[in-house]
Image: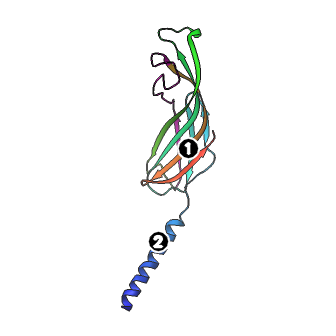
Amino acid sequence: MRMRRRITTLLAAASIAGLATATGAATVRLSDRPQFVDHGTKLEVRGALQNLMSGGATVAVRARGLARIVCMAPGTQDSSARNSRSVVVVANASQTLSSVAVASSTASFAMTVGPPTLASSAAAGCPSDRWAARIDHVDFRSVTIRVTQAGRVVLEQTLRP
């Protein structure tokens, strides 16, 4: 009976020590504020990460913005037959960082997000799907950066570009 209690106590202590080690690990973070370069309908995102675990990582970027949509009547290129409206859009990109790229717990990433795609001309606010819809410009309002390692989200941060 005493032996069983000691083993249980030792196992509990080992579990707590392992938990303390896992939670005491450094938190993954951005080294500095990422750089954002607006290319009209695309957004270039560059940044650096610190405190990564050894092994690979995936950086996913989701950019949300307000797109200016130009709708053109069927069979015409005439500017008088155009309508312009604004629609909320989302564009995604991701980059896989190899274990070699994650050197000494740091890594850099760079990717271009967009241009966003439209489900249909009508969904973009044009009178019907017979109209041609084109994204003229996107005013990117927020960017969410999500980093995963070993199937676990280690960083998720939303920034204004």
Secondary structure state at the residue bearing disc 1: strand
Q: Quadrant of residue 44?
A: top right
Residue 28 x, y percent position in the rendering: 55, 55
Point out the frontmost of discs 2 and 1: 1
Residue 59 x, y percent position in the rendering: 49, 45
Instruction: Relative to 66, say whether 104 is above or below.
Output: below
- Locate the N terminus by quadrant: bottom left
Looking at the rendering, the stretch of residues picked out in magenta corresponds to 105-132
Residue 137 x, y percent position in the rendering: 59, 25
- 49 left or right of 11? right
**Count of marks overlaid on the render:** 2
The residue identified by callout 2 is 18
Main SS category, magenta section: loop
- 68 left or right of 98? right
Magenta-span inclusion, residue 117: yes
Secondary structure state at the residue bearing disc 2: helix
Residue 41 x, y percent position in the rendering: 56, 28
Q: 103 or 147, which is in the foreground?
A: 147
- Locate the C terminus by quadrant: top right
Instruction: Relative to 130, say whether 54 is above or below.
Output: below
The residue identified by callout 1 is 144
Q: Mark 2 touching mark 1, by CB under 8 A?
A: no
Residue lying at the far bottom of the rendered structure: 2
Q: Amino acid at mark 1?
A: Thr
Instruction: Relative to 125, say whether 7 is above or below.
Output: below
**Mark 2 or mark 1, earlier in chain:** 2
The Cα–Cα distance between marks 2 and 1, rounded to whole angstroms, is 31 Å
- Residue 125's mark? none
